[in-house]
Image: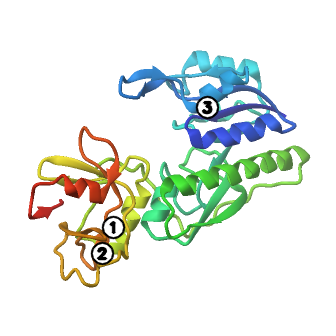
Amino acid sequence: MRLVFAGTPQAAVPALDALLKSRHEVAAVVTRPDAPAGRGLRLEPSPVAQRAAGAGIEVLKPTRPRDPDFVDRLRRIAPDIVPVTAYGALIPQAVLDIPAQGWINLHFSLLPAWRGAAPVQHAILRGDDITGATTFRLVKALDAGPVFGVVTEPIHPRDTAGDLLGRLAISGAGLLVATLDGIESGQLEARPQPAEGVTLAPKITAEDARVRWEQPAAAVDRQVRATTPGPGAWTKLGEDRLKLWPVDPAPDGAASAGSLAPGEVRFLRSGVLVGTATTPVGLGDVQPPGKRRMRAADWARGLRQDVVVLS
């Protein structure tokens, strides 16, 4: 089949790679416009745009999917189908109707669970044991279209969102190609999603990533892992923001450290503990403002405070 692939972040690149290796023709790629990146905030093309350019594929970067020039170009390319992975913009119905076989989305959850922009992060936040990827036909309602196929993936106890998304991107890429093969052969039909079990996964903001030490230790652990690597977990020491990497929910020395109030820090030879609503957690790597990432013990040695409380 003749395809136009729509995707933007690094998590969509394995899907594009799999399509390029498949028997289908990738005629063009649709991605979000170049965005500021790095310390200099220079405009850079998306990871999908960079991969497509390297493969010599036409790259379309509409500001909005309803832009007349983009709609006209998509019609002239005349794809049979548009596979989508994390494109990042809502598609109007008139554009959904252009390809004969519609737009087929690869979504990183087991729909109808975790519809929305951040399914992987929310699955970790809620403590799910298993998640997966789903291919479905895009419709106007958010992630509500009929399902073609699924793959499942266990969530490991120490998974960050980045770890889990990396595995799902690879297994989901294979699912996407298999879905297109099944549609082309006529052997695969979409089935409506069940009405029960719908949960929503809105975008995780920087404020969502601020650690709430008044939670139980298990919840603090999940919050930090769910926001790693982006937007990045953080807390405050006075007026300074301290970036955090995954914590240890059962650190050595916690039992003998005594009671710690939420956010209270205790320095031990074995590490740095922080109080929660239940037992203390051990800090992993941290990054103070204007400094490099470092081990929490190294950070602690540079402090000149007897009493430290994070908030």
Side of 71 where 246 appears, left or right: left
Circles 1 and 2 in contact, beta carbons < 8 Å: yes
Amino acid type at mark 3 = Val
> Where is residue 7 drawn, in percent x and y?
61, 36
- Mark 1–mark 2 distance (CA, rounded to whole Å): 6 Å
Q: Which of the pair 53/74 is nearer the observer?
A: 53
Amino acid type at mark 1 = Val
Dot 2 crowding, Cα within 10 Å, few <14, some 14–19, many 20+ = some
Dot 1 crowding, Cα within 10 Å, few <14, some 14–19, many 20+ = many
* Residue in the picture at 78% in, 46% down: 177
Residue tagged 2: 216
Residue tagged 1: 220
Identify the secondary structure beneath mark 1: helix
Side of 284 where 45 appears, left or right: right
* Residue in the picture at 35% in, 74% down: 251
Q: Is residue 277 above or below residue 69?
A: below
Residue tagged 3: 48
